[in-house]
Amino acid sequence: MAREPTTDDSIASAPTADRHRQSLADIRETYAENASTMARLGWLDRLITGRYRRSAFRTAEGRVLDVACGTATNYRALPDGTEYVGIDLSPEMLDAAADRHPELERGETLFEMDAQSLAFPDDSFETVVSSLSTCTFPDPLAALAEMSRVCAPDGQVLLLEHGRSDVGAIARFQDWRADAHFEKHNCRWNQEPLDLVSGSELAVREYATWAFGILTGIRAEPGE
Ligand SMILES: C[S@@+](CC[C@H](N)C(=O)[O-])C[C@H]1O[C@@H](n2cnc3c(N)ncnc32)[C@H](O)[C@@H]1O
């Protein structure tokens, strides 16, 4: 007897972009498992990513919202004089952020929230930053629209995202392993960050790529 198609069947046969779209519950589970490991990756940041964070966020000013802040690694990458607020979906990542930075308190500066539906009024922040996050959001365009909404009209949205390399061999490897990588990490590692943001409500003003084109820094302004 033919069996009824299941949700899993329709996901498996969907185009890649749709197939690589997980539920918020899956994301919470992934990061509950990874929070303590990620909190111990400070050395990796000092060695590699820290310089790109500082470069991408060098123009941040005023009240800054860090969307999908994880363990709040961006906190130390922001210029002096900025006021930090972080949100993340994962309570375990937020706990790790508060442990790493005792001056950041849950419920004061760190909030559990979905990036796709931010609980802040319009125009609440002079700067919105986010890093290594759009690859995980189930609906990245919705999250980028929320970043645009909560950013002041004369403010800026600064992103540091990873994606498909511009070196052919690396890109082909990323494409080949995209399903397996997504399965394990809930991460679309061959996405094209600039294309994604260009198709969002944000207006891209500047960008730079680093590390074989795997990292992209983007300075954008809220849409009209
Ligand atoms: C790879 S980590 C990056 C963390 C941090 N931004 C950094 O650069 O180290 C991705 C983060 O996105 C968070 N996240 C994923 N989906 C989210 C959502 N819909 N809303 C808020 N946070 C989300 C995860 O919980 C995780 O902390």
Image: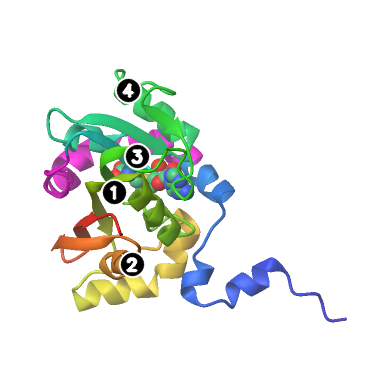
Q: Are marks 2 and 1 in contact (CB under 8 Å)?
A: no
Of marks 4 and 2, which one's residue comes earlier in the chain? Answer: 4
Report if residue 214 lies within the magenta region.
no
Residue that numbered label 1 is attached to: 131
Q: Quick check: is 45 in the magenta stretch?
A: yes
Q: Position of residue 138 (x, y in %)?
A: 49, 58
Circle number at residue 104: 4
**Residues at badges 4 and 2 in contact (C-beta under 8 Å)?**
no
Q: CA distance from mark 4 to mark 2?
A: 31 Å
Marks 3 and 4, the one that precedes in the sequence: 3
Q: Earlier in the sequence, mark 1 or mark 4?
A: 4
Q: What residue is shown with label 3?
A: 69
Q: Earlier in the sequence, mark 1 or mark 3?
A: 3
Under mark 4, the amino acid is Leu
Distance from label 1 to label 3 (Cα)?
A: 8 Å
Residue corresponding to mark 2: 196
Is 8 on the left-hand or right-hand side of 192? right
Real-space CA distance between mark 3 and mark 2, rounded to the nearest whole angstrom = 20 Å
Q: Say which residue appears at 16% left-offset and 49% top-offset.
A: 56
Q: Is mark 1 within 8 Å of ligand 1?
A: yes
The answer to whether the residue bearing label 2 lies less than 8 angstroms from the nearest atom of ligand 1 is no
User: Which of the two marks, 3 or 2, is nearer to us in this view?
Assistant: 2
CA distance separating discs 2 and 1: 14 Å
x and y, in percent, of residue 204 in the image = 22, 63
Q: Which residues are magenta?
A: 32-60
**Which one is in front in this view, the residue at disc 2 or the one at disc 1?**
2
In primary-sequence order, the first of circles 2 and 1 is: 1
Residue drawn 44% across the image and 47% down it: 115
Q: Name which quarter of the figure residue 106 lies in.
A: top left
